[in-house]
Amino acid sequence: MNKKAISLISGGLDSAVATKLIIDQGIEVVGLHFTSIFASKRDKQRGHRALETARELGIEIISKDKGEDYIEIVKNPRYGYGKNMNPCIDCRIYMLSLTRNMMPELGASFVVTGEVLGQRPMSQRRNTIGLIEKRSELKGLIVRPLSAKLFPPSIPEQEGILDREKLLGHAGRGRHVQYELVERYGLKEFDLPGGGCLLTDPIFSIKLKDLMATDPVYTTKDIELLAVGRHFRVSPSAKLIVARNERENEKLGSIAGESYIRLDPVGFRGPRGILKVATPDEGTFLTSARILARYGKDVPPNPVIEIHDGTSHSFSFEMHEIDSDSLLIQQEA
């Protein structure tokens, strides 16, 4: 066993101070940051913060995407979901397994994480941590500097690579210990605790469940669009996305031609929509157009919607009230 480790760096507080504790023992550390299609806006900001954390610590960092195979894990996790669609245990096993596969290439002999015993209800319980370590085939090779003294000595500790007395025995959700370390080390490049991936968000989870249940050939683009606009289930095989602001209007405008049909208001101010449908028909277009017009301003009695489905044509329809709320896949926050 050598004095080189891979440290999982999220960009948050815990992984920053945990990594510093290991560096201070003369260990060469390579940072590893995982990205995902399910990253929230906060997570994406943390991705940038992870780079800054590594720079402040003076270490190399590698970014790795979880990939499309992770989507299959989300669809059918072996160890189930948290409160929403978050498969926290399976996710942790997946990331650590990928890390294990990178160890020979990077010449690392153990893994460092910022985990704290009891901090998270699903993936950081004692029995769950043991399960994750076993399933990722890293038994004895994961060092958790913030809680190390609450676990049996890891192999690096047993072999004298790490001094166990310089590791900590912190547990629980409080972070006073971490903030004391931040002050001692003068660290500045880390994100505050909180946030979470989109899979922990109840509204996103509802939309993801609907997508997985109704579209057997959904793509990563379909998943990315779950975080954009209002989503309506027009029929079992048709879904409409309606923009909520100008930024989303522009984004939806760039999607047309990628298996989505674009709908634009003509002669009145209103949002753009995109429709994904197995077999387009007049009834689907009419319902979608009426939903689109419902969110418009100064809508005339017979509004016009332009349809871009490989061609560009428009149709006029008679406007009347439609119970679009019953078709809304999620309730707006």
Image: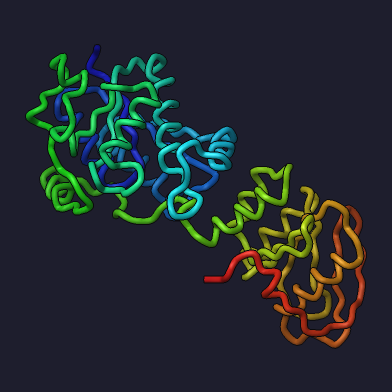
Q: How is the image coloured?
A: rainbow
The correct choice, above or below, for 288 with respect to 9 in the image is: below
**Rendering coords of residue 199 (x, y %):** 49, 51
**Rendering coords of residue 198 (x, y %):** 49, 53
Outermost residue, left side: 165
Question: How many labels, in total?
Answer: 0
Image quarter of the N terminus: top left
In this rendered view, identify the residue nearer to me: 270 or 208.
Answer: 208
Give the left or right position of residue 145, taking residue 64 as reference. left
The correct choice, above or below, for 184 with respect to 332 in the image is: above
Task: Report the residue at 86% width, 71% height from top.
Answer: 286
Outermost residue, top side: 1
Q: In which quadrant of the rendered view does residue 298 lie?
A: bottom right
Task: Report the residue at 88% width, 83% height from top.
Answer: 302
**Rendering coords of residue 167 (x, y %):** 13, 33
Task: Report the residue at 18% width, 31% height from top.
Answer: 151
